[in-house]
Amino acid sequence: MSAVIRPETPADLAAIRAVNDAAFGGAQESALVDGLRADGDLVLSLVAEAGGAIVGHVAFSRMQVERNGAAAPAVSLAPLSVRPDRQRNGIGTMLVRTALARLTERGESLVFVLGEPHYYGRFGFSAEPATGFVSPYAGPYFQSLTLSERAPSAGAVRYARAFVALS
């Protein structure tokens, strides 16, 4: 069964929480998404719907890259979740590919993710270009993807308030 990828609606919020809780085995990611939404920091939130049920979700939030007293916008991919009984069926890939295309169309220039390099590498994310950024998550799992030549190549990464609240 294939899935339809679409923007979240208010009617999806409980199902999004359920997918995140099931995928991550707890409510931390749900709390993150709820906080990002409440603060107005969600840039893009997509769901995967199959058979009338929400089976996957991906969120992108606003962040800033600061350098030499100036700030440039960027986005953070987090979280990506798929219901456990639907994992390894391409739903996560569909969510990320669709979202990255929409972010590019909207003029976003830079995306960060903290995740498995092998998985996110298929979308063009890499830890190498992310080494130019100062982040509390720096290391081999901190990756970036440039969507346009306007993207900064270095600076201090500032996450949305909801991320700080979870630390």
Image (spheres, helix red, strand yellow):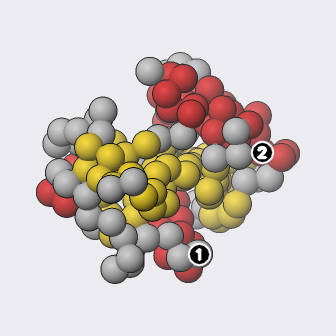
Q: Mark 1 = which residue?
A: 106
Residue at the disc numbered 2? 12
How far is mark 1 from mark 2, CA to CA?
23 Å
The residue at the point 29 percent across, 35 percent down is: 137
Residue shown at 71% from the left, 46% from the top: 40
Secondary structure found at label 1: loop
Q: Residue furthest right?
A: 11
Q: Residue 109's x, y, as percent?
A: 43, 70
Q: How many marks?
A: 2
Image height of 93 relative to 54, above or below = below
Viewed as shown, does residue 122 lie left or right of 21?
left
- N-terminal of the pair, mark 1 or mark 2, is 2
Callout 2, which amino acid?
A: Asp
Whether residue 129 appears in this view of the structure is: yes
Q: Where does residue 112 sit, x and y in percent of width and height?
A: 37, 53
Nearest to viewer (mark 1 / mark 2): 1
Q: Mark 1, residues whose alpha carbon is within 10 Å: few (<14), some, or many (≥20)?
A: few
Which residue is nearer to you in this view: 29 or 76? 76
Picture residue at 49% right of the left edge, 49% below the top: 63
Front-lying residue, 164 or 60: 164
Horizontal side of 100 relative to 40 (left or right) equals left
Residues marked 1 and 2 touching at CB (< 8 Å): no
Q: Position of residue 88 (x, y in %)?
A: 39, 49
